[in-house]
Image (cartoon, helix red, strand yellow):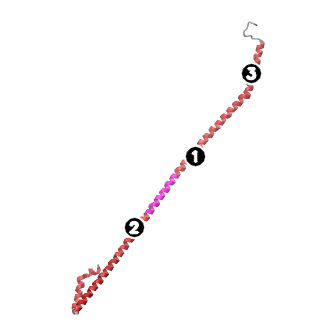
C-alpha cells in the first residue's frame, strides 16, 4: 500500500462510521443539553417581550382612555366655570339694577321732601306777607282813627285798600 495517497481499506471505513456515529451521538447529546435550553431561553425571552409589548399596548390604551377622561373633565370644569361666571354676572346686573332703583327712589324722596319744604317755606312767606299786610292795615287804621274820619270813610278806605291789593296778593 505504499503507492496510495488515500487508502480506503475496511479499517478506515469502520473508523469513519464509528466517527460519524460518535459525531451524531455527540451532536444529539449537545443538541439536547445545549440547543434545547438555548431555544427555551429564546422562547421565554420572546414570550416576555411579547407580554411586555402587550402590557405596553394595554398601558397605552389606558393612557389614551385617561387622557380622554381628563379632557372631558377639563371641558366639564370649563363649562362649570363659565356657568358660575354667567350666574355671577347675572347677580351683579341684578344688584346693579337694585342699587340704581334704590338711588332713584332716594332721589325721588329727596325731591319730594325738597318740594314739601319749598311749599312750607312758601306758605310761611304767605303768612308773613299776610301778617305784614295786617300790620300795615292796623297802622293805616290807626292813622285814620287819629285823623278822625267817620266810620263810612274808614270802611271805604279799608275796602279800597283790600281791592287794590287784590285776591292774588293773598293767594300767591
Q: Which residues are magenta?
A: 77-96
| Disc 3 and disc 2 in contact, CB within 8 angstroms | no
SS at mark 2? Answer: helix
- How many discs appear? 3
Task: Quadrant for residue 153, please give it.
Answer: bottom left
Per the picture, the main secondary structure of the magenta-coloured stretch is helix
Is residue 143 depicted above or below 81 in this figure? below
Give the residue at mark 3.
Answer: 23
What is the quadrant of the C terminus in the image?
bottom left
SS at mark 3? Answer: helix
Give the residue at mark 2.
Answer: 104
Q: Position of residue 157 (x, y in %)?
A: 22, 88
On screen, residue 12 versus residue 74, left or right, reads right
On screen, residue 109 versus residue 23, left or right, reads left
Give the residue at mark 1.
Answer: 66
Q: Position of residue 104 (x, y in %)?
A: 40, 67
| Depth order, front residue of 54/6 | 6
| Depth order, front residue of 167/132 | 132
Q: Residue at x 75, y 18 (%)?
A: 19
Amino acid at each position: 500500500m505504499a503507492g496510495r495517497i488515500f487508502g480506503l481499506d475496511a479499517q478506515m471505513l469502520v473508523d469513519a462510521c464509528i466517527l460519524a456515529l460518535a459525531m451524531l451521538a455527540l451532536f444529539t447529546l449537545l443538541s439536547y443539553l445545549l440547543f434545547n435550553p438555548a431555544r427555551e431561553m429564546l422562547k421565554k425571552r420572546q414570550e416576555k417581550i411579547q407580554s411586555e409589548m402587550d402590557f405596553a399596548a394595554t398601558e397605552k390604551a389606558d393612557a389614551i382612555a385617561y387622557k380622554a377622561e381628563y379632557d372631558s373633565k377639563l371641558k366639564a370644569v370649563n363649562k362649570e366655570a363659565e356657568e358660575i361666571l354667567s350666574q355671577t354676572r347675572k347677580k351683579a346686573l341684578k344688584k346693579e339694577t337694585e342699587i340704581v332703583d334704590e338711588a332713584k327712589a332716594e332721589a325721588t324722596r329727596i325731591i319730594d321732601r325738597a318740594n314739601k319744604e319749598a311749599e312750607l317755606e312758601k306758605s310761611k312767606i304767605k303768612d308773613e306777607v299776610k301778617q305784614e299786610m295786617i300790620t300795615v292795615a292796623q297802622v293805616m287804621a290807626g292813622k285814620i282813627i287819629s285823623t278822625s274820619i267817620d266810620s263810612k270813610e274808614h270802611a271805604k278806605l279799608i275796602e279800597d285798600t283790600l281791592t287794590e291789593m287784590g285776591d292774588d296778593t293773598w293767594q300767591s
